[in-house]
């Protein structure tokens, strides 16, 4: 099992929010195509996770495309984005 595999598991909503956010922050450093869809798949109503997830998604251009697709499909609601992020 790689660190990336463990971190992908730890961002799932079944885990404590603080664990998820820390795992997400560590996971953001990986430049792998499976990261962005996993971040979207783990999306839920937790504000702290949403903030960290948005930061991770906006940190790399290819992730922004996945974020836009998630917004267009309704997987992520525009209302989930804080006003500062919506303007980006």
Image (cartoon, grey):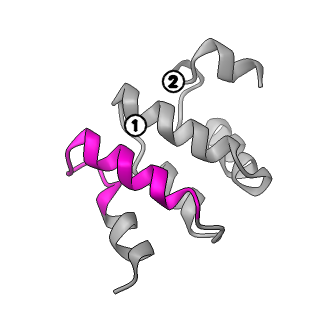
Q: Position of residue 49 (x, y in %)?
A: 40, 37
Up-down relation of residue 39 to residue 2 (above or below): above
For residue 75, say whether it is visible.
no
Q: In this image, 3 relative to 88: left or right?
A: left
Which secondary structure is most common in the magenta stretch? helix
For residue 83, say whether it is visible.
yes
Magenta stretch bounds: 10-29
Up-down relation of residue 30 to residue 71 (above or below): below
Q: For the residues marked 1 and 2, what is the alpha-carbon distance in whole angstroms?
A: 11 Å
User: Dot 1, how many residues are within 10 Å of its Cα: few (below 14), some (14-19), or many (20+)?
Assistant: many
Q: Position of residue 67 (x, y in %)?
A: 65, 44
> In the image, which is nearer the foreground, mark 1 or mark 2?
1
Which quadrant is home to the N terminus? bottom left
Q: Residue at x 33, y 30 (%)?
A: 46
Please give the label number shown on residue 49: 1
The answer to which quarter of the image holds residue 37 is: bottom right
Identify the residue position indicated by label 2 in the image: 80
Q: Is residue 19 magenta?
A: yes
User: Dot 2, how many residues are within 10 Å of its Cα: few (below 14), some (14-19), or many (20+)?
Assistant: some
Q: Earlier in the sequence, mark 1 or mark 2?
A: 1
Q: Position of residue 36 (x, y in %)?
A: 59, 57
Q: Position of residue 26 (x, y in %)?
A: 46, 57
Q: Residue at x 59, y 38 (%)?
A: 55
Q: In this image, 65 relative to 18: left or right?
A: right
Check if mark 1's residue and mark 2's residue have beta carbons within 8 Å: no
Which quadrant is home to the C terminus? top right
Label 2 SS: helix
Q: Residue at x 63, y 12 (%)?
A: 83
Q: In this image, 17 relative to 52: left or right?
A: left
Please identify the residue farthest to the bottom as the structure is shown. 1
């Amino acid at each position: 099992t790689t660190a990336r595999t463990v971190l992908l598991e730890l961002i799932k909503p079944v885990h404590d929010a603080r664990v998820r956010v820390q795992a997400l922050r560590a996971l953001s450093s990986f430049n792998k195509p499976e990261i962005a869809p996993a971040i979207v798949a783990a999306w839920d109503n937790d504000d702290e996770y949403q903030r960290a997830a948005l930061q991770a998604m906006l940190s790399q251009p290819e992730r922004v495309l996945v974020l836009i697709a998630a917004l267009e499909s309704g997987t992520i609601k525009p209302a989930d984005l804080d006003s500062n992020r919506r303007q980006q």
